[in-house]
Image (spheres, grey):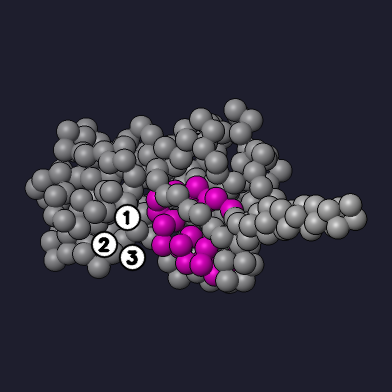
């Protein structure tokens, strides 16, 4: 009888070990981030995994698409948006840990062209932008994708909107706009400075004045009900190691 008891105890302990061990090994954090952060967050995630032993699962898309996914129950722990609008959208629906939210990064808006096909542009209301190039202008969807929203603001502020709006192609996210320009399917594109910086198949034509659009801000927050690793990852994003990566890709650090 005693032998049977110990045998049962050993079996129970073995089952407990089998259940608890994988749970520890599978510690992870799921990050939903704006498409323009693809390279930077990819590098930071690799660095974080090495330093913390926590797996980072990243999903990149337009901030609007990610916010809708989170609203519908997608298993995100951390959300990094390319504007405040979509962060506010989730906060208003009580989908965020409000205390964890803060502005993380800044960026700039630039005009690009396919490699070797640049053209002259003057960022002034007196300049006839529509006649500066032939073909389509690519940017993010003008109503939902942050890059497209900023682009429309700039084009309007410079007095160029009415003459060019019929030639604009709105894409699902800013990296799709970049790809269209790189392939020559669009003669020009409006993307972030950081997107242009990682592209070897496009040229930066000019930078839009920061005063021509709302400030480009990337807020970050933990998703409501997220794992404990979410806040730790968010803290890591402000570390000197992560800040160095953001700076290398051309992002400005909030508060700097």
Tell me whether the residue at label 1 lies in contact with that at label 2, contact meaning CB atoms closer than 8 angstroms.
yes
The verdict on residue 45 being magenta is yes
Q: Which residue is mark 3?
A: 198
Q: Which residues are drawn in magenta?
A: 29-48
Q: Give x and y (percent) for residue 20.
A: 71, 55
Residue 239: in sight, yes or no? no
Q: Earlier in the sequence, mark 1 or mark 3?
A: 1
**Label 2 crowding class (10 Å Cα cut-off): few <14, some 14-19, many 20+?**
many
- Of badges 1 and 3, the one in the foreground is 3
Q: From the viewer's side, name the closer residue of 3 and 176.
A: 3
Tell me the tag on residue 241: none
Rendered residue at 16%/38% (across/down): 167
In the rendered structure, are the residues bearing label 1 and label 3 in contact, judged by CB atoms less than 8 Å apart?
Answer: no
Farthest front residue?
Answer: 1
Name the one closer to the observer, 12 or 231.
Answer: 12
Identify the residue at image location x=36%, y=32%: 143
Q: Choose the circle earlier in sequence order: 2 or 3.
A: 3
Q: Position of residue 45 (x, y in %)?
A: 52, 63
Would you say 94 lies left or right of 249 here? right
Q: Which residue is mark 1?
A: 110
- Taking depth in this image into account, of 28 and 89 the one nearest to the observer is 28
Q: Say which quadrant the C terminus sits in.
A: bottom right
Farthest-out residue, right: 2
Q: Residues within 10 Å of mark 1 (few under 14, many from 20)?
A: many
| Prevailing secondary structure of the magenta residues | helix
Looking at the rendered structure, the secondary structure element under dot 2 is strand
Disc number placed over residue 204 in the picture, else none: 2
Q: 161 left or right of 28?
A: left
Q: Residue at x 80, y 52 (%)?
A: 8
Residue shown at 47% from the left, 33% from the top: 68
Q: Is residue 171 magenta?
A: no
Q: Position of residue 118 (x, y in %)?
A: 16, 61
């Amino acid at each position: 009888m005693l032998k049977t008891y110990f045998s049962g105890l050993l079996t129970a302990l073995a089952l407990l070990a089998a259940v608890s061990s994988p749970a520890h090994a599978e510690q992870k954090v799921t990050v939903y981030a704006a498409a323009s952060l693809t390279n930077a967050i990819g590098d930071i995630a690799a660095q974080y995994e090495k330093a913390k032993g926590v797996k980072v699962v990243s999903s990149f898309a337009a901030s609007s698409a990610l916010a809708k996914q989170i609203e519908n129950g997608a298993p995100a722990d951390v959300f990094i948006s390319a504007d405040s609008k979509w962060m506010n959208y989730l906060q208003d629906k009580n989908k965020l840990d409000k205390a964890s939210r803060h502005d993380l990064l800044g960026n700039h808006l630039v005009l690009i062209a396919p490699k070797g096909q640049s053209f002259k542009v003057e960022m002034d209301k007196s300049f006839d932008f529509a006649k500066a190039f032939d073909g389509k202008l690519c940017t993010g969807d003008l109503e939902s994708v942050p890059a497209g929203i900023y682009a429309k603001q700039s084009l309007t502020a410079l007095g160029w909107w009415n003459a060019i709006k019929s030639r604009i192609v709105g894409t699902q996210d800013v990296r799709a706009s970049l790809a269209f320009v790189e392939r020559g399917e669009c003669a020009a594109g409006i993307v972030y400075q950081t997107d242009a910086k990682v592209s070897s198949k496009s040229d930066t034509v000019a930078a839009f004045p920061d005063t021509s659009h709302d400030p480009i801000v990337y807020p970050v927050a933990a998703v409501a009900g997220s794992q404990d690793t979410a806040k730790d990852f968010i803290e890591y994003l402000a570390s000197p190691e992560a800040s160095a990566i953001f700076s290398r890709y051309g992002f400005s650090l909030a508060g700097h």
